[in-house]
Amino acid sequence: MIRLAIIGTGGMAGTHARSFAPMKGVVLSACCDVDEKKAREFARTWNIPRWYVDYDDMLGSEKLDAVSNVTVDIMHAPISLAAVTRGLAVLCEKPLATTLADARRMRDAAARRGVVTHVNFSYRNSRGAQAAAGLIQGGGIGRVLHVEASYLQSWLVHDAWGDWRTNPSFTWRLSRAHGSAGVLGDVGCHIYDLTALLCGDISEISCTLKTFDKGVKGNRLGPYLLDANDSFISSVTFAGGGIGTIHATRWATGHLNSLRVRVYGDEGAVEVDLDRSPEHYRYCRGAGSIRKAQWKEARGKATPSQYERFIRAIRSGKSDNCDFANGARVQAYLDASVVSDQEKRPVKVKA
């Protein structure tokens, strides 16, 4: 029996609980949140026997095998490190940390302790993306030469998800003082991870970050200074020699939550478009199809969710390829992007 605790009981924690609760051989033993009322209500909702307001108290009191860290970004490092030190497996929400130094500490501590780790890059749940990655990595389109990748949202131009002017769950994402790394940290980590899953490691990044005027007096809403980036464009070089563009924005009218990666090789091409279908991918391969620019669609085989991958890794005793080492690599992409924008030059990635 795998005894698991959930730390942080906000909105995303419900997804974690909903995913783990029905799994055979997994029991939700405890939960924790600095907000006592939220912790108590979460425990009641998910039939969790014990709740805490202090994670150190919980880790010291409970007999656990694993924790799911669903806290705000700035708490990813201290909580994950506390769990790793106790020999617990850790599933951490993305991004792994808020600094590359912390991400490296987390990676190295887990390696020394020999514990299973996982980062919840949720778009790896796509069976289409996983199948496309297998095709590309298996040489199915030859050498990767050119890549286009984008993550497009539009909640700064509509209120379909809620009004960012009045909803704190959106407003804080626009303010660096409230812990936001902008669109780069919030969704850029996803598109960097998905692109690297398909195309391999990124070795160099040239990035431009942009914060646009939002028509708010003094660029401030109450305690929120609206200074976090809301668009970025990166020109990247892959370790395998290919080049590409990766970009994201919250100003993409007509796109609620759109991720797409197009990969062009010297023997074919692949497209993953999660708006079209998370289960499918498109490809153009073979002399006849290439000559006619003819694309075909394929459905990927069923793939485990990130939560299932984490539990499988615990049972096998070995982390899979979405562990803290991968999380640190993605953090290095974010770090290089910020440095590149600040210094107006391409930056080598050093994970």
Image (spheres, rainbow, N blue to C red):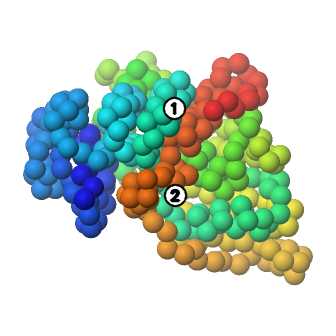
Q: In the figure, 37 relative to 190: above or below?
A: above
Quadrant of image for the N terminus: bottom left
| Residue 309 image position (x, y, % from top left) | 44, 59
What label sits on residue 49 in the rendered view?
none
Q: Is residue 36 left or right of residue 317?
A: left
| Nearer mark to the viewer, of 1 and 2 | 1
SS of the residue at dot 1? helix
Q: How many marks?
A: 2
Q: Amino acid at mark 2?
A: Arg
| Residue 160 image position (x, y, % from top left) | 38, 52
Count residues near mark 2 (Cα–Cα under 10 Å), then give few for <14, some for 14-19, many for 20+.
many
- Residue 236 lies in what quarter of the image? top right
Q: Is residue 128 left or right of residue 238?
A: left
Q: In the figure, 304 relative to 117: above or below?
A: below
Q: Amino acid at mark 1?
A: Asp
What residue is rendered at 13% in x and 49% in y? 43
- Residue 69 lies in what quarter of the image? top left
Q: Foreground: 62 or 322? A: 62
Quadrant of image for the C terminus: top right
What residue is rendered at 80% in x and 48% in y? 240
Q: Foreground: 49 or 149? A: 49
| Residue 284 image position (x, y, % from top left) | 77, 73
Count residues near mark 1 (Cα–Cα under 10 Å), then give few for <14, some for 14-19, many for 20+.
some
What residue is rendered at 65% in x and 62% in y? 133
Q: Is residue 332 left or right of residue 62?
A: right
What label sits on residue 108 in the rendered view?
1
Q: Which residue is mark 2?
A: 124
Q: Foreground: 27 or 329? A: 27
Distance Cα–Cα, label 1 vs label 2: 24 Å
Q: Foreground: 260 or 163? A: 260
